[in-house]
Amino acid sequence: MYIHIPRKPFVIACLVVSLAWAGCRAKAPITRTWLPMGTVATLTFSRTMPPVHVEAHFHAVTSVVHDIERAMSVYIPASDISRLNAAAGEGMVPISTHTRRTLEAGIAYAEGTGGAFDPTVAPLVNLWGFHQRAVPLTPPTPEELHTALRTVGYRHVVISNSAAALRRPGMRIDLGGIAKGYAVDQGFDALVRANIQHFMLDIGGNLRVRGTSRPNKPWTIGIRNPFESGRIIGTLQLPSGMAVATSGNYERFVTIEGRRYAHIIDPRTGMPVQGMAGVTVVCPSATQADALSTALFVLGPTGAREVLAAQPECHALFVPDRHPLQIHITPGMRPLFKPLPAHADQVTTRPAL
Ligand code: AMP
Ligand code: MG
């Protein structure tokens, strides 16, 4: 989750007591926090608003996010995704518009990233002990990986109008890498329709802003230091309408035989990604930022070149999983990212990206 930074001297205090940060300012914005999609979400209005309007707008956002969670959660047996997964290898299953759009977007990003992002990655995610499965005592064997890989592949998903099918038995969809971004975009659109000019919506680190945090002050968030929880490496100023997502190896991981494995899996090899600590992506839509941050985490700065060249509206920041800390940014990230002075020397802009 990001932390909005109202004033620099208060950065650390706000980080430590992130949910109480509003108290760090004389004129606190209006913030509402809730717990959808297995994570923490925050809606912030930067301007005063009658309480009755705050509650009405908050309700509009929570209700659309709730609908999306009910449609796509793998933890809800009656969700579209649970039913689709249960019918793998069988026929078409009716799905809601939210699920169809997210699945279509997921498949488009799978095509655009050479399969680094793949919404059918679930059998591998499960194999490594995520999604509330038992963590294995030893890493999966090559045979187990091979078997699971045969059930992974976005090309085996069929979508037609309001129904979808998984062609191979054992296939499973996991929209965990894109659904929160989609939910942010839907909440964002609901507030735009209600003519709210200045707000920030964050669902588990997938965030989109409109307007400014104060007159002439862009929304500014801290980017977490992947190696030190409670610390940031710098701040990111977000132009109105833009979204940001971060994928990190510190968010969720399993430990097998004393070794840590991150929750993002390379669908092409079946292995949890090694080598990246964090990837932050800024894009015009939260769905795009969410899918790309997951994909670029898999691809790393070099592998990401082609993907970023095809999407010049997106900007990326990479922190490799190496010491000393290095921060690689794309040229478009430069005007948005302000490193802390202690990290200024560690930033490289990579024109070749
Ligand atoms: P994020 O935090 O947005 O990067 O999403 C990570 C989540 O997406 C994981 O917890 C998995 O549920 C799922 N996931 C893992 N690897 C991939 C992948 N390569 N492509 C798509 N989704 C993935
Ligand atoms: Mg993602």
Image (cartoon, helix red, strand yellow):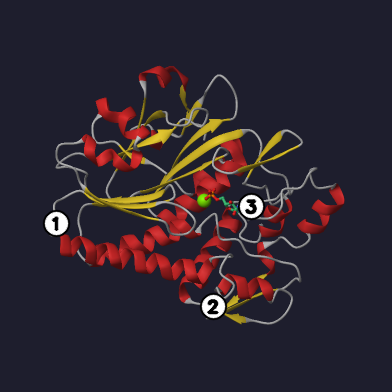
Q: Residue 114's spot in the image, x, y percent? A: 63, 52
Q: Earlier in the sequence, mark 1 or mark 2?
A: 1
Q: Residue at x 71, y 59 (%)?
A: 123
Q: Residue 240's spot in the image, x, y percent? A: 27, 49
Structural crowding at the residue carrying mark 2, measured as other residues with C-alpha within 10 Å and reported as few (<14), some (14–19) or many (≥20): many
Q: Residue 97's spot in the image, x, y percent? A: 47, 75
> Which one is closest to the eye, mark 3 or mark 1?
1
Q: What number is the disc on residue 166?
A: none
Q: Earlier in the sequence, mark 2 or mark 3?
A: 2
Q: What amino acid type should be assigned to the residue bearing mark 1? A: Met
* Residue 214 against residue 40 in the figure, above or below: above
The residue that mark 3 highlights is 114
Question: Is the shortest distance between ligand 1 and the CB of mark 3 under 8 Å?
Answer: no
Question: Is the shortest distance between ligand 1 and the CB of mark 1 under 8 Å?
Answer: no
The residue that mark 1 highlights is 49
Q: Kindly report the distance in space between the C-alpha atoms of the residues bearing marks 1 and 2.
A: 37 Å
Q: Secondary structure at mark 1?
A: loop
The residue that mark 2 highlights is 95
Q: What amino acid type should be assigned to the residue bearing mark 3? A: Gly
| Disc 1 + disc 2, Cβ < 8 Å | no
Q: Is residue 61 visible?
A: yes
